[in-house]
Image (spheres, grey):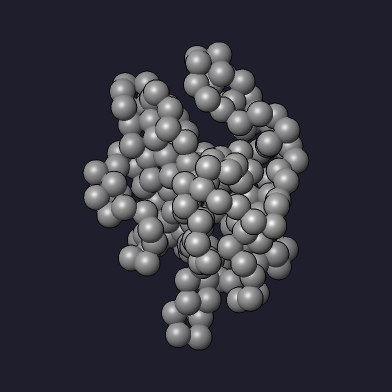
Amino acid sequence: MTVRECDVPSSSTLNRALIERSYFHDSYRAPLTQSSMGIIDIFFALFGHHPLWMKRILIARNVAARIFGLEAPMIAEILKPRARSSYVAGDKIGPWPVCFIGDHEIVAGRNNKHLDFRLSVLKVVDGETTGVVVSTVCSVHNLFGKIYLFFIIPFHRAGVQLLMSNAVTAKRI
């Protein structure tokens, strides 16, 4: 399998204390055969190609989230994510606000009433091997956050691995 679970790399800008006290975190690594790709291109190679069935699930989830008064991406952000040539903290990349962007990492996420999450896409180089690591960190604020994650985590794990695997298979990364 080309995608494997791993630890959050120490080179990530994700706060170590945040990771340690998080309710949930995970990381997956895939090979990056196109080592000259920039971090924005890597992000969209992974998260700009959701299968239609996955887009439909995300849209339904977001409609439900808005009913409960939570901030959620708009339908257009799910159906047709638009890539720009550059981003700064505060911009939206895909459906999420950018928290940090550097040459080798982009961290996006959102703070909601029930939980805060951060998604890191990190380009890593180990000697002659280049890879990409996608890490997610979630901190819950209440029982609703715990219940939400109980149902979402299995889909999240499978979804991230599928998106990464599809990107490798399609030779987008």
In which quadrant will I find the C terminus? bottom right
Q: Where residue 159 sits: x, y (%)? A: 56, 45
Q: In the rendered image of this protein, does residue 85 appear above or below residue 61?
A: below
The residue that appears at 70% across and 51% down in the rendered structure is 83
Residue 141 or residue 58, whichever sits in front: 141
Classify residue 92 as left or right of residue 24: right
Q: On the picture, is 125 further left or further right than 25? A: right
* Residue 154 visible somewhere in the drawing: no
Residue for point 66% across, 61% down: 41
- The answer to whether one can see residue 18 in this image is yes
* Quarter of the figure with residue 11: bottom left
In which quadrant of the rendered view does residue 148 lie?
top left
Q: Is residue 33 above or below residue 59?
A: below
- Residue 71: x and y in percent read 52, 25
Classify residue 52 as left or right of residue 67: right
Relative image position of residue 29 (x, y in whole percent): 48, 64
Work out whether 11 lies above or below 146. below
How many tags in the picture?
A: 0
| Residue 35, horizontal then vertical, whole percent | 61, 76
Query: In the image, is residue 31 above or below residue 12?
Result: below
Outermost residue on the bottom side: it is: 128
Picture residue at 52% right of the left edge, 71% below the top: 131
Q: Say which quadrant the N terminus sits in.
A: bottom right
Q: Nearer the viewer, residue 170 or 95?
A: 95
Q: Residue at x 47, y 71 (%)?
A: 124
